[in-house]
Image (cartoon, rainbow, N blue to C red):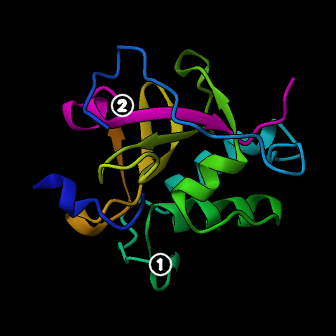
Amino acid sequence: MLTALLAGCGQSPRRFDSPAPTPQVHRPPNGGWFALPSEDHGQEMVMFALGLLDTGYRFGGKNPDAGLDCSGMVSYIVEQVSGRRLPHNAAGIAERTRPIATQALRPGDLVFFNTLGRPYSHMGIYMGDGRFIHAPSSKGKVRMDRLDSRYFAERFEGARTLLPEG
């Protein structure tokens, strides 16, 4: 039932602490991953996301005034922080961002979940200490959750970064 409530953002359930198989995602055709120009942008993204807590959920929502869905929240924050645009689709964002190991997560990295029986159907922004901020349709507001919570640990798909390779 909860799975249906998270619809609107993007295999089999697994535990967060077990290795997650990496879905097929290829390097973008232009040969490079989308990356923000500065390491500082990761912390800025977290701060901006914290300011959006309790913002209403809206399927297809792209701004806080009208409401946000998961990919709309991430796209909005990236544009506010950097002036650059990402697609408004969790799978599309996953295709354009560099994969990283879960153990390498830093604040501002992206976390992806399989909530609809397809890869990268939900996403959020990692804030550190095992927590992430996302816009789920369940409970209708941007909120913070833990990666090791039962629901999200079983659906964790992988992590990707917007930060430059260093």
Q: CA distance from mark 1 to mark 2?
A: 24 Å
The relative height of residue 123 versus residue 66 in the rendered view (above or below) is: above
- What crowding class fits label 1: few (fewer than 14 Cα within 10 Å), some (14-19), or many (20 or more)? many
Quadrant including the C terminus: top right
- Identified at 30% across, 49% down, the residue is 117
Residue at mark 2: 147
The answer to whether residue 5 is left or right of residue 77 is left
Report x, y in % for residue 150: 20, 30
Q: Which residue type does callout 1 highlight?
A: Gly
**Does the magenta portion include 152?**
yes
Report x, y in % for residue 164: 84, 35
Callout 2 secondary element: loop
State the mark number for residue 162.
Answer: none
The answer to whether residue 18 is left or right of residue 75 is left
Q: Which residue type does callout 2 highlight?
A: Leu
The relative height of residue 106 versus residue 86 in the rendered view (above or below) is: above
- Identified at 82% across, 66% down, the residue is 83
- Sequence-wise first label, 1 or 2: 1
- What crowding class fits label 2: few (fewer than 14 Cα within 10 Å), some (14-19), or many (20 or more)? many
Considering every residue shown, the one lying at the far bottom of the view is: 66
| Residue 142 placement: quadrant | bottom left
- Identified at 54% across, 68% down, the residue is 72
State the mark number for residue 61.
Answer: 1
**Does the magenta portion include 154?**
yes
| Residue 68 placement: quadrant | bottom left
- Identified at 36% across, 68% down, the residue is 8
Please report the bounds of the magenta region as a residue range.
147-166
Quadrant including the N terminus: bottom left
